[in-house]
Image: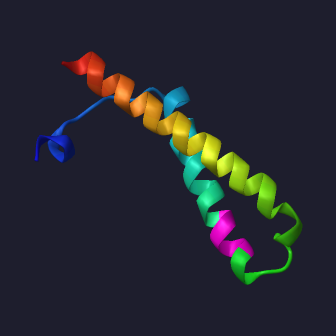
Amino acid sequence: MNFFKSKTSWSNAEFIIIKLCIATAYLLIGSYFHDFFKDYYTPLLILFGITVIWFVYLWVQKMKNRT
């Protein structure tokens, strides 16, 4: 499948989005096991959802511009 073999280049500013997305996913997983993050579960879930949508949008735009 060519979808997984395609290569794109990312600027540092664009790469921050995926790092933030992954970091919030780690915090969501960690909040499941620890009560410390329990109060922040909803804001972290919202942040994770926004960054996932943003990252996928940027990725699709790069794939469209490549062809």
Q: From this viewpoint, which residue is outermost toward the bottom?
A: 33
Q: Indicate left or right for 3 with 10 as reference.
A: left
Relative to the observer, which residue lies in front, 41 or 13? 41
The x and y percentages for residue 41 are 78, 63
Q: From this viewpoint, which residue is outermost toward the left?
A: 1
The x and y percentages for residue 5 are 15, 43
Q: Indicate left or right for 16 with 28 as reference.
A: left
Is 27 rendered above or below residue 44?
Answer: below
| Colour treatment of the image | rainbow
- The residue under the point 82% across, 69% down is 37
The x and y percentages for residue 45 are 70, 56
- The residue under the point 60% across, 60% down is 25
Is 62 rendered above or below residue 3?
Answer: above
Q: Is residue 28 magenta?
A: yes
Magenta region, main secondary structure: helix
Instruction: Identify the magenta region.
Output: 27-31
- The residue under the point 74% across, 73% down is 31
Q: Is residue 18 magenta?
A: no
